Image: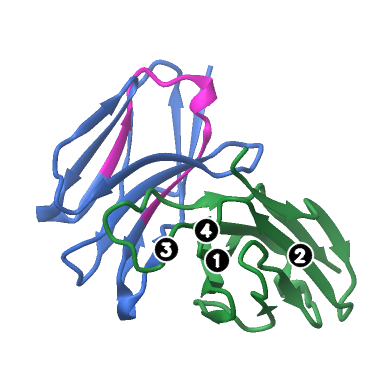
Chain colours: A blue, B green
């Protein structure tokens, strides 16, 4: 069965520090997608990134970067020079083909607090 | 604007009083799903629908019903709400249940915060 583990429940950092959010996944499928979503205090879910299982290139988007390593089944998310606006709950998610149809499984989320 | 619309945003109700949370999408998506979000548990899938008249249980379907009579609408029904159904609910839609290469993730509604007293 698929599973997504975000072991860090809450993280607090001081503004401008770098922070890495960990995500470990389990799946039996060879084709799957990984995602990160941000949930700010306002509550909506904001899509950040998608990565498919065949693309292990790391990605950088501004202050955000993602490290995908199939060997360790991890898809970690780093925020460089954190800002107060980064304070949110971040969810990692896995999409695979459990039972022949797509299923999206979310981790339990990591709450990030950036202190000014 | 492409969006998923949920109503209401906030709802306080009493135990046992039937309620419906509506969800509508304007993107002609085939696949729709309901999730509930609880502290420490992340988002858990309640029900999903792969197309009109095709629905199935997710991970936590007990106490909920859904219907998919039209492609754009996927209401969540609580026939007899109980306090353990107090939660934040999200409706989501996507292109296809079986598409593999071009799936860019869910579009989520804004959420419905339900309190059952």
What SS does tag 2 mark? strand
Subunit ID for the residue under disc 4: B
**Residue contact at pointers 2 and 1, CB within 8 angstroms:** no
Question: Which residue carries the number 3 mark?
Answer: B96
Vertical arrangement, residue A92 with respect to residue B67, above or below: above
State the mark number for residue B33.
Answer: 1
How far apart marks 3 and 4 lie (CA) works out to 7 Å
How far apart marks 2 and 1 lie (CA) works out to 13 Å
**Residue contact at pointers 3 and 2, CB within 8 angstroms:** no
Evaluate whether label 4 is on the same chain as label 1. yes
How far apart marks 4 and 1 lie (CA) works out to 11 Å
Stretch in magenta: A76-93
**Residue contact at pointers 4 and 1, CB within 8 angstroms:** no
Is residue A10 one of those drawn in magenta? no
How far apart marks 3 and 2 lie (CA) works out to 23 Å
State the mark number for residue B21.
Answer: 2
Is residue A88 one of those drawn in magenta? yes
What SS does tag 3 mark? loop
Evaluate whether label 2 is on the same chain as label 4. yes
Residue B80 visible at all: yes
Q: Please rate how many residues cluster around mark 4, counting C-alpha atoms within 10 Å: few if below 14, some from 14 to 19, many from 20.
A: some
Subunit ID for the residue under disc 2: B
| Quadrant of the snapshot with the N terminus of chain B | top right
């Amino acid at each position: 069965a698929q599973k997504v583990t975000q072991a860090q429940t809450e993280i607090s950092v001081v503004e401008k520090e770098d922070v890495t959010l960990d995500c470990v996944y389990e799946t039996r499928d060879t084709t799957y997608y990984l995602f990160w979503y941000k949930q700010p205090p306002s509550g909506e879910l904001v899509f950040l990134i998608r990565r498919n299982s065949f693309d292990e290139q790391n990605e950088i988007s501004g202050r955000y970067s993602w490290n995908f390593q199939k060997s360790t089944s991890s898809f970690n998310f780093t925020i460089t020079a954190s800002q107060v606006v980064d304070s949110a709950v971040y969810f990692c998610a896995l999409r695979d083909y459990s039972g022949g149809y797509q299923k999206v499984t979310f981790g339990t989320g990591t709450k990030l607090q950036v202190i000014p | 604007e492409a969006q998923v619309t949920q109503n209401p945003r906030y709802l306080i109700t009493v135990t046992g009083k039937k309620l419906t949370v509506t969800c509508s999408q304007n993107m002609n998506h085939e696949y729709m799903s309901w999730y509930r979000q609880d502290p420490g548990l992340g988002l858990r899938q309640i029900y999903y629908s792969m197309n009109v008249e095709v629905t199935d249980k997710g991970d936590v379907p007990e106490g909920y019903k859904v219907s998919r009579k039209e492609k754009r609408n996927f209401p969540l029904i609580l026939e007899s709400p109980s306090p353990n159904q107090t939660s934040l609910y999200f409706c989501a839609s996507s292109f296809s249940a079986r598409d593999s290469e071009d799936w860019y993730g869910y579009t989520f509604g804004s959420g419905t915060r339900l309190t059952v007293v």
